[in-house]
Amino acid sequence: AMDVSKSMLADDIKPNRLEKSKQFVSRLLEELPDDRIALIWFAGKAYLPMPLTADQGAANLFVQSAAPDAVPTQGTVIGEALRLAAESFPQQGKRYKVVLLITDGEDHDESAVTMAKQLKERGILLIAIGLGTTEGSAITEPGTTEYKKDKDGQTVVTKLNEALLKEMVFANGGLYGNMQNTDALLKEVTAVIDQLEKKGTDGEVSTNYSNYFMFFLALALLLLVIELFISERKTA
């Protein structure tokens, strides 16, 4: 679930928050070649441009095309993005499910923590990745060299809302990481997913197979009993 709001164009993380998130997701896809992935873009609304697929090439194309103009309504509706993510998983099946949320969390979405709890109830792990700094940065308007200003003419400064993201992760029992150290974060995220995959595979061994030998054993015993009542006759 990628935040594509205009605040993601802030360059307190080089080259900017959005480009940094694209780089991270592309590298993560390389580390998880056998996993299925869906992609959600969100700002003031949440959209599902790519449902769950194993096509890594298509996934990369969608990741690279993420941009603020892909979602006309501005804002940061994290709760709606998490709801859409939960609905995008197959409702049946015991495979592990992870929502990777990449955002600066700038707007305080009151439903975000509630949705994080609901993900936990559905057995979905939340990994939240924060982009930006607590000091913040101005936002360059797309296609210009001018900074975005508010209605009073003041330069808008966007800051990482780390407190919200940590609160969500605490409610879910998931993982929080900051994009400052990409290599370390990538290792941590892939390690968590690999661990979940192994746990899910181990669980499937004991739950997906049913024992039917009792039916065949009963049938064999029945045939033995019937044989006792069948007299032997010699044929001429």
Image (tube, grey):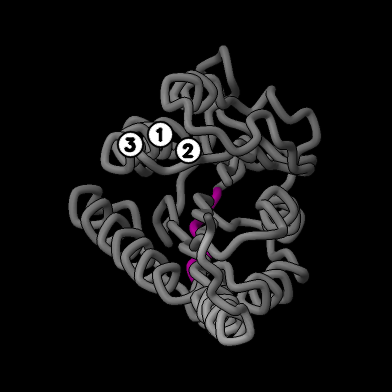
Task: From the viewer's side, name the closer residue of 49 and 19.
Answer: 49
Task: From the viewer's side, name the closer residue of 157 and 121.
Answer: 121
Reading the image, the residue beneath label 2 is 10
145 up-or-down from 117: above or below:
above
Task: From the viewer's side, name the closer residue of 224 and 161.
Answer: 224
Q: CA distance from mark 2 to mark 1?
A: 6 Å
SS state under label 2: loop
Residue drawn where x is 50% and y is 50% of the image:
102
Residue drawn where x is 53% and y is 55% of the image:
236
Can you tell which mark lies on residue 16? 1
Q: Earlier in the sequence, mark 3 or mark 1?
A: 1
Q: Main secondary structure of the magenta part?
A: loop
Amino acid type, residue under disc 2 in the picture = Ala
Q: Earlier in the sequence, mark 2 or mark 1?
A: 2
SS state under label 3: loop
* Span highlighted in magenta in the image: 158-162
Q: Is residue 167 visible?
A: no
Circle 3 crowding by C-alpha within 10 Å: few under 14, some 14–19, many from 20: few
Q: Is residue 236 magenta?
A: no
Can you tell which mark lies on residue 33? 3
CB under 8 Å between callouts 2 and 3? no
Residue drawn where x is 74% and y is 37% of the image:
47
CB under 8 Å between callouts 2 and 1? yes
Which quadrant holds residue 11? top left
User: Residue 124, position in %: x, y?
Assistant: 57, 67
Circle 1 crowding by C-alpha within 10 Å: few under 14, some 14–19, many from 20: some
Q: Earlier in the sequence, mark 2 or mark 3?
A: 2
Amino acid type, residue under disc 3 in the picture = Pro
Q: Is residue 17 visible?
A: yes
Q: CA distance from mark 2 to mark 3?
A: 31 Å
